[in-house]
Amino acid sequence: MMGELFSFALVVFLGQFSPGPDMILLTRTALAEGRKAGCWMVLGIVSGLSFHAALAIGAMAALFSFIENAASGAGLLRGLHWLAAAYLTWLAFGLLRKKTRSDEPGLSGRSPYFRGLFCNLLNPKVLIFFASVVAPFLAGSRPDWWPFALGLLIVGEGLVFWTLWVCFLQNPRIRNGYLRLGRTIDLVFALLLFGLALHLLR
């Protein structure tokens, strides 16, 4: 079982550090707004992960049967894609409108926690990813504590490794590079967010 847990942890780790809305927004926030804002965003993203992990582990079979087989389920999933794409586009436009370095990316006055939370919650691919990952690890006879261990790994890895990522981005050379090229980097981040939004609508 320890081998299975290690395999699951490795898959989750690779998924959490693959390019996506969470990583793009977290990286940009940690560079532009510092360690404190980055850590608050980590907490927001992990809160969203907790919700997705609970759904994926607790109701995976019923949820996917609904989405795959019911016409209303397909419409619901499509609606989530449009909602997530709209949110990512709004974030991207915020970065493009930013005039000075002190400006927030179109989100002035909004907590990094809630930005991270909504970015994660509005991404249905997070739920789909976790459901597909946990499926083989839930098959067969398992002890009662097993689903909780999988959920704890998902949340724990996000909290630990994303916090370490935020701290890594505070390296003076990395931060100074961002300060010199901040506007160009923001443009790249905006284009990445636009690309993710378009990908959701394919």
Image (spheres, grey):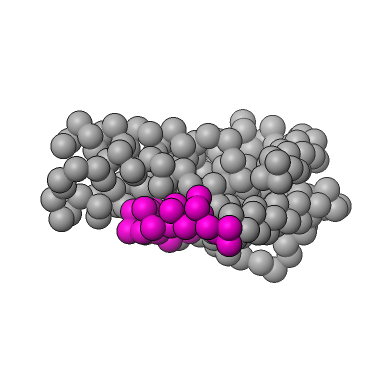
Location of residue 47 (image quadrant): bottom left
Which is nearer the eye, 41 or 11? Answer: 11
Span colored in magenta: 48-73
- Up the image or down, 143 lies above or below 136; here it is below
Q: Quadrant of the N terminus?
A: top left
Report the predominant secondary structure element of the magenta stretch: helix
Left or right, residue 64 beside residue 117? left
Q: In this view, does 115 lie above or below 199?
A: below
Q: Which residue is drawn at 58% across and 62% down?
A: 72
Q: Which quarter of the picture shows residue 171?
A: top right
Mark yes or no: residue 165 visible: yes
Q: Position of residue 180 (x, y in %)?
A: 76, 35
- Tell me if residue 62 is in the magenta stretch: yes
* Residue toward you, 182 or 68: 68
Horizontal and vertical percent position of residue 119? 60, 55
Residue under the point 70% across and 41% down: 202
